[in-house]
Amino acid sequence: MLYKHVLKPILFKFDPEAVHDFFTDTGELLGTTHLSRTAIDLAYGYHGPDISRTVDGIRYRTPFLLSAGFDYDGHLTRILPHIGLGGEEIGSVTARPCEGNAKPRLTRLKESESILVNKGLRNEGVDAVIARLKSVPMESIGGIGFVAGISIARTNDAASVPIQAGIEDYVYSFKRLNEESVGDYYTINISCPNSFGGEAFTTPELLERLLTAIKAIPCTRPVYVKMPINLPWEQFNALLRIIDAKGLNGVVIGNLNKDYDSLDVRAEAPASYRGGLSGKPCTHPSTDLIYKTREVYGKRFTIIGVGGVMSPATAMEKFDAGADLVQLITGLIFEGPGLIKQICKAEAARKNK
């Protein structure tokens, strides 16, 4: 109530990227002391019945994670466990630092409950993220059960556009993370729509080349692929067949929605394409693909569901469709950090029926 009726109207008067940076800086600061972590935990932590899940050998104390796209550089690992999250996906990180696309990189579409995202993979680069995560005292991350996955993308610059250069870009980040034993799982992000060269690896032939190179790197952690959600099922399934053949653990379904006509209020978005849609426009496309993937492949894939989780009901829909874990960002922006506790309570009630 405090967030939705007092803080949110104030925050929504300011530039969304400035608000994002403010919350990142504040969250990092709050994570530095036991007192502040405890205070946040008292207000927002989940302390109800056990809803933990073990997925691919990793225990998540709650099955809800912050999606990639918020904590680009791994600043928030010490505070996020205290708002009921079972983990987060850091990044996407790239082989070289990225400033991102020209501003504005974030635009609120209030009536459509969406964010127009055109960040362009802004991050400090994989080596800087590795150094930061290795410097975090593990005992302060919230105890057992908080998971830090890492999303890996191709650097958003002209040098990574040639296909072989793009593959080597992915491989560098993947190799460095494995060499340094940083991250609990890895997601290969092939579906970022806002970068040089577009989504080159969303064709079966090029995805096979990329995953062949990835599989050549020794790795003991689960590896997933983050999927686009605007492909017809036949094309989507063609990518799944490659992922299956290469023996990866599963998929994250999915990335931003590129169809502006899916907005409740089309006029909120620009006439021509300039970034992908998060939030409500992603709800049904991602859930439908989760359902179809589970129906066709059974238990072959771990499925992490993300897109349009704006309420406990939409989170439960992801599970009902077949997701093993659920990620979110935009729901927190529109509903506030208390949303996680609400979703955790809904999951506890669902388990205890």
Image: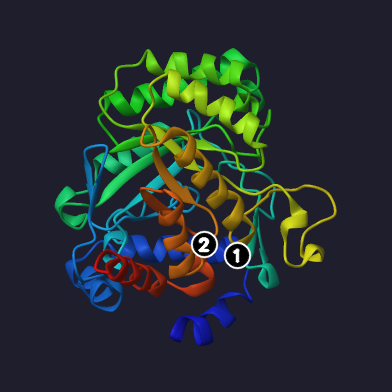
Q: Is residue 254 visible?
A: no
Kindly indicate the quadrant of the structure image that contains residue 284. Answer: bottom right
Compare residues 1 and 301 and report the one nearer the observer.
301
In percent of width and height, residue 165 lies at 57, 16
x 61%, y 50%: residue: 285
Vertical relation: 297 (above or below) 169: below
- Give x and y (percent) for residue 239: 56, 26
Location of residue 173 with respect to 306 vertically, above or below: above
Q: Tag 2: residue type?
A: His
Name the residue beneath numbered marker 2. 20
Q: State which quadrant residue 196 falls in.
A: top right
Q: Alpha-carbon distance for marks 1 and 2? A: 6 Å
Tell me the tag on residue 16: 1
The residue at the point 51 percent across, 23 percent down is 241
How many marks do you count on the picture?
A: 2
Q: Quadrant of the C terminus?
A: bottom left
As helix, strand or loop, the secondary structure at mark 1 comes to: helix
Compared across the picture, whether 22 is left or right of 161 comes to left
What is the three-letter code of the residue carrying label 1? Pro
Check contact, mark 1 vs mark 2: CB within 8 A. Answer: yes
- Nearer the observer, 309 or 35: 309
**Where's residue 131, x and y in %?**
31, 37
**For this rendering, which residue is in front, 155 or 274?**
274
Q: Secondary structure at mark 2?
A: helix
Q: Vertically, is 286 above or below 107?
A: above
Residue at image position (46%, 73%) is: 336
Does the rendering let one see residue 43? Answer: yes
Query: Quarter of the image containing the N terminus?
Result: bottom left
Q: Position of residue 22 (x, y in %)?
A: 48, 65
Q: Residue furthest right?
A: 271
